[in-house]
Amino acid sequence: MSSKTKIVVLHLKELIYTGIFIVLGILLIVLLIFMFLPEKETSPQTTPTSQYIAGVYTSSIDLNNHTLDLKVVVDNNHINSISLSNLDETTTTMYPLMQPALDELCEQIYKNQSLEDISYSPTNQYTSAILLKAIDSALAKAEKK
């Protein structure tokens, strides 16, 4: 029986280059798989959608001969500030509960980021109702449709 011995000579440099190219090829295939796989649907709780168009929105409140502007500042997901403008001295004198009622409402609105479940004291229920209606009107202008 005669066996022919074959001698294979491998150069170390060629082995290293081949190994590097194989690793790079595998990385390229994995990268392409991750890039072109369809994305999984995320639940609405993990990624909140924006509910407002960011900006400053106003609503008018007519009190006898005085007009007050209620300004609501929102960003995409938050109510940032609520304030009264055109609140002069005579209006403050005629309606002394206007600013304290607004402060009480703002505290709850900032905490909840919603107009739901807002409570107010019975002593200023009518003032609070007028303010809530104006805030709701301004937020309606800010909502995405």
Image: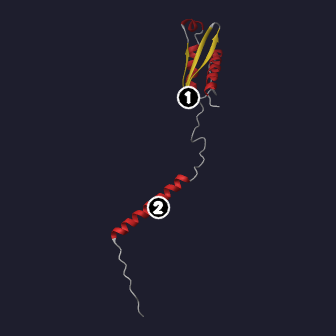
- The spot of residue 50 in percent (x, y) is 58, 34
Give the mark count: 2
Q: Quadrant of the N terminus?
A: bottom left
Q: Position of residue 113 (x, y in %)?
A: 58, 29
Q: Is residue 27 left or right of residue 133?
A: left
Q: Secondary structure at mark 2?
A: helix
Rendered view: 9 above or below 55: below
In the displayed structure, 36 sits above or below 11; it is above
Q: Which residue is painted at 56% across and 53% down in the image?
A: 37
Give coordinates of residue 62: x percent, y percent. 64, 12
Q: Residue at x 65, y 18 (%)?
A: 129
| Residue located beneath label 2 in the image | 26
Query: How far from the left and from the top, in percent, is residue 57?
Result: 58, 22
- Quadrant assignment for the C terminus: top right
The residue that disc 1 covers is: 54
Q: Amino acid at mark 2?
A: Ile
| Vertical placement of residue 90 versus 109, above or below | above
Q: Is residue 64 left or right of residue 35?
A: right
Q: Residues within 10 Å of mark 2 (few under 14, many from 20)?
A: few
- Residue 93: assigned label: none
Frontmost of labels 1 and 2 is: 2
Q: How is the image coloured?
A: secondary structure
Q: What is the C-alpha distance between the residues marked 1 and 2? A: 45 Å
Which structural element holds mark 1?
Answer: loop
**On the rendered structure, is 34 left or right of 10?**
right
Answer with the quarter of the image where residue 86 lies.
top right
Ranked by sequence position, the earlier of labels 1 and 2 is 2
Mark 1, other Cα within 10 Å: few <14 / some 14–19 / many ≥20: some
In depth, the one of 129 and 84 nearer the eye is: 84
User: Relative to the observer, which residue lies in front, 56 or 92?
Assistant: 56
